Amino acid sequence: MSLKLGVPSKGRLMEKTFKWFEKRGVTLSRSASDREYAGRVDGVDGVDLVLLSAGEIPRELAAGRIHLGVTGTDLVHEKLPRWEQQVEQVEPMGFGQADLILAVPQSWVDVDTVDDLDAVASAFRARHGHRLRIATKYHRLVREFLTDGGVADYQLVDSQGATEGTVKNETAEMVADITSTGETLRANHLKILSDGPVLKSQATLWRSRSVVMTDKEKAALKQMLALLRGES
Ligand SMILES: Nc1ncnc2c1ncn2[C@@H]1O[C@H](COP(=O)(O)OP(=O)(O)OP(=O)(O)O)[C@@H](O)[C@H]1O
Ligand SMILES: O=P(O)(O)OC[C@H]1O[C@H](OP(=O)(O)OP(=O)(O)O)[C@H](O)[C@@H]1O
């Protein structure tokens, strides 16, 4: 069997991933049709390209269906419990930087920190009879962060997109989401809590810890890593 390299098939990480490999002597190419999720790897023998959504790459690494994969730190930490046991970080790639943050309405002038949030959350529950709602797709990371910060009076509301709009739409009181330029937060009149971020993320090359490799796969991995690390 060949070594399997999983890369984002679309979205913001795809193009930069292809360029990052190219710069290191490994050419990734998609088949002629953009709609066909197939491609090839040139520059190292015995490697297959697997095109996947960035969000699915953590699971495929953990299951051992791909040996190497490119995706954001945020997605690995969110989707894999005890991620260190399932994957190993090979190289941070220097693009796709984003911070996972907590943000509240700018009009909450008394709330700047997690401590302030704790006080407001308790008062909110007493006044409204339900817990303060935080919209996010990062359930695990947000829960861990708030537990560490001693905040308990809240509930998570799942939001898989347009998360900053949930406050205006009154389906949540605040959000936990990824930001890079901060423009979406500003446009939606939200401000970031100062004691964060919950996580700093960037595109990263990961290696699965779940596969037993054949000699051929081991040789391809060695050659690939030497090239990517500039050792050959
Ligand atoms: N401004 C940003 N907003 C959202 N994600 C960003 C941003 N900048 C970098 N990223 C990173 O990009 C990755 C998500 O990539 P992308 O948006 O292409 O995937 P997606 O299409 O949302 O995933 P999927 O294909 O699973 O739906 C995450 O690791 C995220 O941290
Ligand atoms: O800080 P900024 O540069 O404004 O970027 C942050 C925004 O980008 C992402 O959304 P995306 O574009 O992936 O759309 P989505 O709302 O469908 O997730 C993220 O969820 C924020 O909404």
Image (spheres, rainbow, N blue to C red):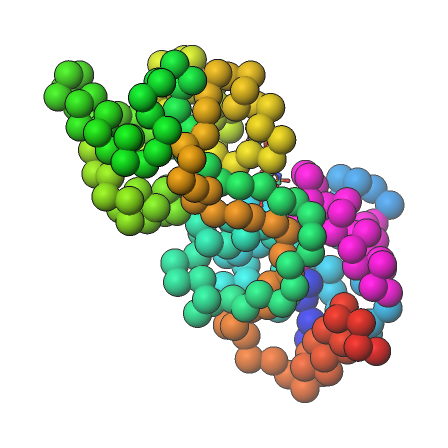
Residue at point 44%, 49% (across, down)? 78
Quick check: 14 above or below 182? Answer: below
Q: Quadrant of residue 222?
A: bottom right
Residue 92 is situated, as x and y percent measured from the top left of the image, at 64, 59
Front-most of 221 and 16? Answer: 16
Q: Residue furthest bottom?
A: 215
Image x and y of residue 178, in percent: 52, 36
Q: Is residue 15 magenta?
A: yes
Q: Observer-nearest residue: 166 or 199? A: 199
Location of residue 41 in the rendering, given as x and y in whole percent from the top left corner: 81, 62
Residue nearest the viewer, comparing 126 with 12: 126
Please check the rendered image and state whether residue 55 is part of the magenta-colored stretch, yes or no: no
Visible in this render: residue 175? no
| Residue placed most toward the observer, 177 or 69 | 177
Residue lying at 24% horizontally and 25% vertically, measured from the top left: 120
**As drawn, 144 above or below 104:** below
In-image side of 70 versus 232 (left or right)? left
Which region shows up in magenta? Answer: 6-31
The quadrant where residue 232 appears: bottom right
Horizontal relation, residue 124 to residue 170: left or right: left
